[in-house]
Image (cartoon, helix red, strand yellow):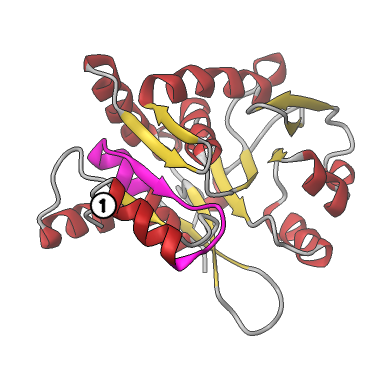
Amino acid sequence: RLSGPARPDEARKRMRQTVRDFNDRARQADFTAVVDDHGRHGARDLLRRAPELAGVMSPDGTTGGTVLLQADNSWRTLAATLATGLTGGVLALVNRHTTRTEFTAAIEDIRPDVLIAEPSAIEEWDGGSALPDAPPSEALDGWTVHAGRGPRDVSRWSGGSVIGLTSGSTGRPKGVVQSESALRYACACTIDVNGLRTGDAVAAVVPLSSTAAYCFGVCLALMLGGPLVLSGRWDREDALARMAAHDVRW
């Protein structure tokens, strides 16, 4: 159950500290931020892409809002995380394998201001009808962005910064709302208990739309300032080989 509306100071802090720390570290020296099926991606490259996406997400200077993202296991999810942090928005995650019925249910529950997904997913879900007043734009190397205009209110998320999916038995997608402080606390404990160090590589081989995979994959990698090693499709041998090649610690 959600608590009352977020205080204004809380709303301004949505994923801001994590993005700011990542930005500061990359300014000091570039490093590999993501290893995925497309290769290596540097932190400075992601920081170049993030403001570009933020601009597309924020037509007429409108910032914040709830951003529904197709969270695939690639550099795009990190770039969208950074962009959403820059605009002070709330990031909601959906999987590419989501059915049209499940997508419709997610739209009803989340009521996003922005939708970001690959064109085939938008077509399959009839995503354009979810934001009928938001003409499609392009970002993230060919993905589609529908960004609504007008006022955006995220107070209903009570200070949350990320909405990730979790398992359930009803057939209706379930979202877990996480604050940045909760995500950072979980990651800080993981770092401490496992003796992880700055620059250590983190692997995420399950879908990043999962709240657990996002927390202990994306957020942990952003805090450590090391590579997030991803696999787009599960294959045990390939995953083990990729983790070994990049000295994954978690």
What's the residue at 47%, 26% (across, down)?
Answer: 86
* Apparent side of residue 193 relative to residue 46 in the rendered image (left or right): left
Q: 162 or 234, which lies in front?
A: 234
Q: Judge whether residue 18 can be spotted in this image.
A: yes
Q: Residue 66's x, y, as percent? A: 62, 42
The amino acid on which the numbered mark 1 sits, given as a three-letter code, is: Val
Q: x%, y% of residue 43?
A: 37, 26
- In the structure shown, which secondary structural element does the residue marked by tag 1 occupy? loop
Query: Is residue 230 on the magenta stretch?
Result: yes
> Whole-percent x and y of residue 250?
26, 57
Say few, some or many: other residues with alpha carbon within 10 Å of mark 1 (under 14 / 14 to 19 / 20 or more). Answer: some
Is 119 rendered above or below residue 54?
below
Residue under label 1: 248
**Above or below for 195 versus 226:** below
Image coords of residue 196 (percent x, y): 14, 51
Give the image quarter of residue 65.
top right
Q: Measured along the vertical axis of the image, is residue 227 above or below residue 240?
A: above
49 part of magenta stretch: no
Residue at 84 percent across and 53 percent down: it is: 125
Asked whether 245 or 220 is in front, the reply is 245
* Residue occupying the point 50% across, 37% down: 75
Q: Toward the viewer: 133 or 48?
A: 48
Task: Locate residue 122: give its quadrant.
Answer: top right
Q: Which residues are magenta?
A: 219-236
Does 234 sit left or right of 250 as displayed? right
Q: Would residue 182 be seen by someone viewing this image from the given angle?
A: no
Judged from this view, the residue extending furthest toward the bottom is 169
User: How many numbered marks are there?
Assistant: 1
Task: Please name the residue shown 46% across and 31% down the image.
Answer: 82
